[in-house]
Amino acid sequence: MSLPKLAFVGPPHAATSWLISSLRRHGTFEALCDADAEREAARLQVRWTFNDLADMLRESEPAGVVLARPPRDRVRLIKQCLTGGASVLVTGAPCSASAAGRLSLFARLSGRCVLAAPAIRYSPAVMLARRLLDSGKLGAPISLSLRSTRRGLPRADFDDHGPVPADQVFEAVDVASHLIGPIRQVAAVPHADGVVVVAAESAAGVPVSLVLHASGPAESIGLELEIRSADGASLRIDRNCELACGNGSRVDAVHRPNLAASDPAVELGYDGLIGEFLRLLRPGTAAGLVGPVAPSAAATEAILASAARGRPVCVRLGESPRRPGTPEATASGA
């Protein structure tokens, strides 16, 4: 059985070594499409390079496309890929919250799928945390705190000019929502040097604290989170993807990667993300927009709007974010 052909569309610097190794492990890395594709072909060891997406879809006929283009171009390029017979993977928000329904319908009519999820959601540590919450071993969550640090993420060709890249906000919101449910209200405060501090609340009433740093020191790069439960237990994941869950001297679960032997592509979630994408490419799998994209996109927009306006914002699915206390926000159940 031949492996499915996969393509990458976007600037080569966005194609990390972990992503490329996962593409090769699960499929055939067939094509790269970008203005600098030919120059980077040898480094990425890709079979074909293209400057035009239409030519790539017609000549290489990929089953799936990993899209890493600016947010303003994503809806147009996703629709072009779906029309050309390829499903799409995006590690950020594929569209605005209000456009999610239309994009999902377009994908279903084309018989293809769009998966929008950050890689870290499929890391062993985060997946174990979800299983612990589902099994009840951790108890009812009473708080979640998350810190995300990146270092000088390139944004020269992107159209989001907030203190933190929109895709970094989407990653944090997606992980938090994946563990404790969608976020319904946010208050974000921007600080100097690309830092945003967010106080939020989930739909279940769990307080959420997010600290997002777009240009942090190298030793702090990564994602860390802590969940505390009503029974006094806590679950922690550090930036090395180590998980510890317990209450005092009691240890309920531990995940500790061996830094000498573990594969970073697996521990950071890239392997699981590509594996899930290829599962969705199988015949008979439901088409459409996969996952809770609209709630995460709406919360991302609300955080960026709150940081720009300097006031709390309620998350209203499918609509523009509203300030708490307005008649529209009250009617939405905020």
Image (cartoon, rainbow, N blue to C red):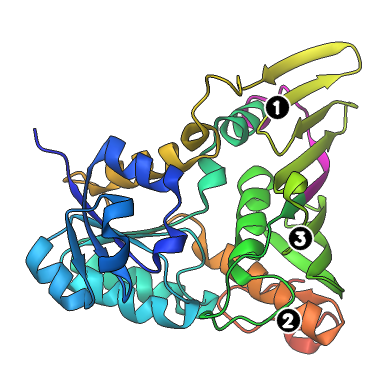
- Taking the image as shown, residue 302 lies to the left or right of residue 262, namely right
Quadrant location, the C terminus: bottom right
In terms of sequence position, does the residue under pointer 2 or pointer 1 come before the other?
A: 1
Magenta span: 133-146
Residue at numbered disc 2: 305
The spot of residue 301 in percent (x, y) is: 65, 75
Q: Which mark is residue 223?
A: none
Q: Check disc 1: other Cα within 10 Å, few if <14, some if 14-19, many if 20+.
A: many
The answer to whether residue 260 is left or right of residue 150 is left
Mark 2 or mark 3: whose residue is earlier in sequence: 3
- Disc 3 secondary structure class: strand
Taking the spot 63% from the left edge, 84% from the top edge, the residue there is 320
Q: Residue at x 78, y 34 (%)?
A: 140
Residue under pointer 3 = 212
Residue beneath the point at 73% across and 50% down: 218
Q: Is residue 307 left or right of residue 13?
A: right
Q: CA gap, disc 2 to disc 3? A: 15 Å
Give coordinates of residue 302: x percent, y percent. 70, 75
Closer to the camera in the image, 293 or 88: 88
Residue 203 in which image quadrant: bottom right
On the question of residue 332 being in view, the answer is no
Q: What residue type is labelled 1?
A: Leu
- Crowding at dot 2, Cα within 10 Å, few <14 / some 14-19 / many 20+, comes out as many
79 or 65, which is in the foreground? Answer: 65
**Mark 2 and mark 3 residues within 8 Å of each other at the beta carbon:** no
Residue position for label 1: 243
Q: Does the magenta stretch include residue 305?
A: no
Q: Earlier in the sequence, mark 3 or mark 1?
A: 3
Front position among marks 2 and 1: 1
